[in-house]
Image (spheres, rainbow, N blue to C red):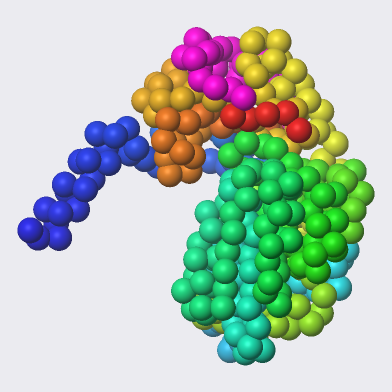
């Protein structure tokens, strides 16, 4: 069988299972009201939570940097790809989250695929074993980072604890005999909007001499009085390793790791996804720096929208997680039902995201809504009305899959 025929057969099987995905073409910005597939619509699935993607200050910063430094970076960071914009951004990010230092990556996926294997490589060079403990609902980039670490060093072991189950995590830590331990968790879980139990995770890390790594991709810019993320929300210090992104609330693209200066030096020297990737354009770095200055003035507006949208959905019969995060999931169940619900919402002028396998387990498909700081009362009402008919499809689903915090 030729590759073409084999791929065709595989694609056919995938589509018959209701798993096919397709891009929607957006003509315009990620503003709430935009054009999707040629039609005026309301976006209820974008991660541009604060509306900074279309902000003039960011565009001006990017334009100015482009005129001065060009459209490309010219190389990887350790060759010719580090500009003064990159250096300034890393200083700005460290200051924003309250860390001694930070290192920028091309994406959140690159960050997790770089940092976790880098720790494994350092443990290997020290002749030490590294045990990694990961929440069952962690992002795919964490899972893949752990897989890569294990494939490169036999001294790496991994344990997956049930979602948010800190009791089982403690049992796993107590039974472990490795010299080094790493607990890894999302700060805000992207498929449920739930928050990690950061108090418990920090205590367990301290009690069992483990490092704690938090991926706060959906928390930075959305949580805390000043939008500094899940740690500010809980009034707790940063973990040993803090991952954040600029592709969601900050409205641009890219990601970073923040922590101690020795940790950042280790990552700079050992993260292969950092070393062997062309760096982000200077214009992108400049735009992210500009975004950081605007976050504190918009985060409380987003919080009000989140509360309002959750309350309206509950009043209409939906069971939604009690969380301050801008991610709201509506369990549906069957993959086909999720696609039909999303199509019905689109017909009513609202774009929502149907989430299916492999993002969630088979048979646990859902609709994923995201809040936007610029939603009006009319926008919120339109979203609630658009997903209302889907409630009947979801009533047979075990909505307790997504418990309240």
Instruction: Report the residue at 68% width, 29% height from top.
Output: 403
Quadrant showing the N terminus: bottom left
Whether residue 147 is visible, yes or no, is yes
Q: Which of these two is toward me, 285 or 341?
A: 341
Left or right, residue 188 beside residue 20: right
Q: In the figure, 230 relative to 36: above or below? A: below
Name the image quarter holding residue 174. bottom right
Which residues lie in the magenta part? 373-400
Q: In which quarter of the image is the C terminus?
A: top right
The quarter holding residue 73 reads bottom right
| Residue 379 sits inside the magenta stretch | yes
Residue shown at 63% from the left, 88% from the top: 127
Could you say where residue 64 lies in the image, as x and y percent from the top left? 69, 66
Quick check: 246 left or right of 334? right
Q: Nearer the viewer, residue 372 or 140?
A: 140
Q: Is residue 24 above or below residue 282?
A: above
Q: Find residue 371 and report its horizontal and vertical position in percent.
A: 68, 32
Is residue 309 inside the magenta stretch? Answer: no
Nearer to the camera, 360 or 69: 360
Marker count (numbered): 0
Q: Mainly helix, strand or loop, the magenta region?
A: helix
């Amino acid at each position: 069988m030729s590759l073409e025929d084999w791929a065709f057969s595989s694609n056919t099987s995938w589509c018959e299972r209701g798993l096919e995905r397709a891009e929607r073409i957006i003509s315009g910005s990620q503003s709430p009201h935009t054009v999707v597939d040629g039609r005026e619509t309301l976006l209820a699935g974008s991660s541009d939570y604060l509306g900074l993607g279309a902000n003039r200050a960011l565009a001006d910063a990017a334009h100015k940097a482009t005129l001065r430094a060009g459209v490309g970076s010219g190389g990887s960071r350790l060759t010719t790809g580090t500009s003064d914009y990159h250096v300034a951004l890393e200083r700005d990010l460290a200051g924003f989250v309250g860390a001694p230092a930070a290192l920028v990556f091309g994406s959140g996926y690159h960050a997790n695929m770089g940092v976790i294997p880098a720790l494994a490589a350092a443990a290997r060079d020290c002749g030490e074993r590294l045990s990694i403990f990961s929440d069952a609902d962690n992002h795919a980039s964490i899972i893949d980072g752990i897989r890569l670490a294990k494939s490169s060093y036999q001294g790496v072991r991994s344990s997956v604890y049930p979602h948010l189950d800190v009791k089982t995590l403690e049992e796993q830590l107590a039974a472990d005999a490795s010299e080094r331990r790493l607990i890894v968790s999302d700060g805000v879980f992207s498929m449920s909007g739930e928050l990690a139990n950061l108090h418990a995770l920090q205590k367990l890390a301290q009690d069992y001499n483990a490092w704690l790594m938090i991926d706060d991709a959906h928390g930075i810019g959305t949580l805390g009085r000043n939008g500094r993320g899940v740690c500010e929300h809980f009034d707790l210090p940063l973990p040993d390793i803090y991952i954040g992104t600029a592709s969601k609330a900050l409205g641009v693209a890219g990601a970073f790791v923040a922590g101690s200066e020795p940790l950042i030096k280790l990552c700079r020297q050992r993260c292969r996804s950092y070393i062997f990737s062309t760096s982000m354009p200077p214009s992108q770095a400049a735009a992210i720096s500009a975004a950081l200055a605007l976050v504190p003035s918009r985060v409380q507006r987003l919080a009000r929208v989140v509360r309002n949208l959750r309350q309206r959905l509950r009043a209409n019969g939906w069971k939604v997680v009690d969380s301050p995060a801008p991610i709201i999931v509506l369990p549906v169940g069957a993959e086909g039902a999720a696609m039909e619900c999303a199509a019905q919402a689109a017909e009513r002028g609202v774009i929502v995201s149907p989430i299916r396998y492999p993002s969630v387990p088979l048979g646990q498909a859902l609709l994923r809504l995201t809040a936007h700081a610029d939603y009006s009362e009319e926008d919120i009402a339109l979203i609630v009305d658009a997903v209302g008919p889907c409630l009947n499809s979801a009533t047979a689903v075990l909505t307790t899959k997504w418990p309240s915090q």
